Amino acid sequence: MTLLVSIVFGVLVGTGIHLMVRRDALRLVGGTVLLTNATILFLMAAAFDGNAVPLLPIADGAVPADPLVQALALTAIVISFGTTVLLLRVALAVERTHGTLDMEDLVRAEVADEPDRDEDAGAAP
Amino acid sequence: MIVLLPLVLSWLSAPVLLLLDGRRPAVAWSAFAILVLVAAIDIALLWAMVWEGREPFTTVAGGWATGSGIRLHVDRVSLFFGAVCAYVLAAVTAHEARGNVRSGSFPALILFVSAGLHGAFFTGDLFNFYVFFEVSVVTSFALAAYGYGREEVRGAFIYIVANLLGSSLFLVGIAVVYHTAGVLDLSILAQRQRETAGIHPLGAALLFAALSLKLGLFPLHGWVPVLYSHAQPAVAAVMSGALINVGAYGLLRIGLDAAEGARAEAGTLLLALGAAAIVYGALLASRRKTPAEIIAYASIAQAGYLVLAFGAGGREGAAAALLVVLSGSIEKAAMFLSQESRGAARSLSALVGALGVAGLPFTVGLLAKIELFRAAVLAPSGPSLVGVILLGTCFLFVATLHFWDRVRRMPAPAAANMPAALVLAATTVALAVLAAPLNRMIFNLSADLVAE
């Protein structure tokens, strides 16, 4: 079980980072989703015990699975859902104001919108 | 129970204001009134705990047994951070309230930030700290895009992605702490630290990386200049004057107590990181042309001061770090708000704010710098650290003059704002005048962070 979780965690993080360095901002959002999911899996794995049984109904003498990490993971899922929705909303706003979600075009827009940074570059000694 | 009032008050009033149209001055002013009340309660309780011997407040939410429920813990340091943040948020709200609130949700979002920050400062549980700082950070995501112009949304996008990475790191750190220690209660973790071993070094390293990303520490500072130069000045003031403190609080609260073992082991590395951030931030601040970028890099240098004090450790280091937080919050907010002020108020608040961030006389920034020297001299390789701080101050002085010059030449805003920037500038000067009692109070506070 530990091996399986480790492999899944590795694949999720790897895919997430791979998506995050792509040019498309929407893929970047997808990458962050995968990364947070990997984190939540890691959180669940913090209290793994192969032989644990569900908390309810509990049989005599059986060791229940740690319910705390499940509560933590649930909270983390809610938070990550909220942030993802906000990130998508901002990505939508970027698309509407720039007409593109290509990171390179956004960098170009950055340079174009630059205030006159070197307004007095000629005056400097 | 009155101790929890600052948290409850902001939390309950925020959703109510969300239902109202925040562009109406009355709504913005009621948010201001609530924040002033919150700051007043924070300061009154802090006063009672520091000078009148009132005991820290601890309760376990929901009546659970100690150790199994979420513990709320309010002591002097919690109230100090709460008071600083509420004060800055109140000033920003007053600044925006005079007829130029550009989005209906702005007053409510400010109150949500206050609720999230107070929750993070008032908790005694590592995961609950994470939840509350996410409340404030998620609110700041919405604030970052405030205005919804081309630049704002671009800055907000970068800011959100960077912070999501930080949150993931923090969560992995929590998982490591829970796996190795089996508890997330900070006082139990601190107790174990004193008896056997504290937070596992890997967990401590992950938490440190996440918190320094939130703090904008070099080399994880990438989002700071992007956000500060793209967001509205009022929003940037909220970020640099209030939100960034959650990183500082986490660093001091977790690092100086529960993770003290790991911190002491990494002491030299922390000092080096702090020194690098000071030199990098101050050098770039002196070379930048736009006021917002100057503040952004000065803020990176401030994060360096904080981590330097943290790396030095002990009561002296904690006191220096608390003063850096106090001066940095008020002065950076004054700098941002001065850009939207008019006339003599603009010139004066820009100059005082910038002098404070550089740690020069007439401001509480100087007191922070003096405490920092004291902490640095006691640390290993003290003389070279003092040299680094002096070098940083020289660069920041150049940045101060640049900033002052630039702000005075900016076009004046169309509408007159409340003189919030001037009030913040006056506050830092007043605190500098009260240096002796302030220093005694801060040293008194540092006892809550560092176990004897």
Image (cartoon, rainbow, N blue to C red):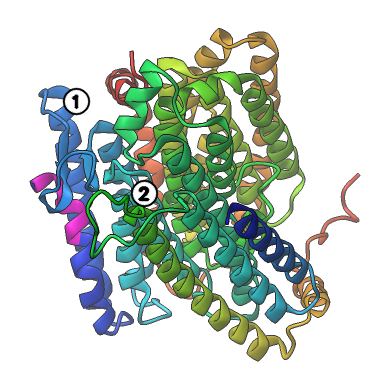
Horizontal side of residue B271 vs B342, given as left or right? right
By secondary structure, the bulk of the magenta-drawn segment is best described as: helix
Do labels 1 and 2 touch, CB within 8 Å?
A: no
What is the total number of numbered labels drawn onto the structure image? 2
Q: Position of residue B241 (x, y in %)?
A: 44, 50
B79 or B301, nearer to the observer: B79
Label 2 marks a residue whose chain is: B
Name the amino acid, label 1: Val
Q: Amino acid at mark 2?
A: Phe
Q: Secondary structure at mark 1?
A: helix
Q: Which residue is mark 1?
A: B50
**Residue at the image position 18 percent from the left and 39 percent from the top:** B66
Q: Is residue B428 visible?
A: yes
Determine the residue positioned at 65% across, 83% down.
A94
Tell me: residue B432, above or below residue B38: above
Location of the C terminus of chain B (image quadrant): top left
- The residue under the point 31% across, 17% down is B436
Q: What is the crowding at mark 2: few (fewer than 14 residues within 10 Å), some, or many (at least 20)?
A: many
Question: Residue B188, located in which quarter of the rendered image?
Answer: top left
The first of marks 1 and 2 along the sequence is: 1
Magenta residues (range)? B2-9
Q: Position of residue B175 (x, y in %)?
A: 48, 48
Query: x%, y% of residue B376?
Result: 57, 15
Q: Chain of mark 1?
A: B
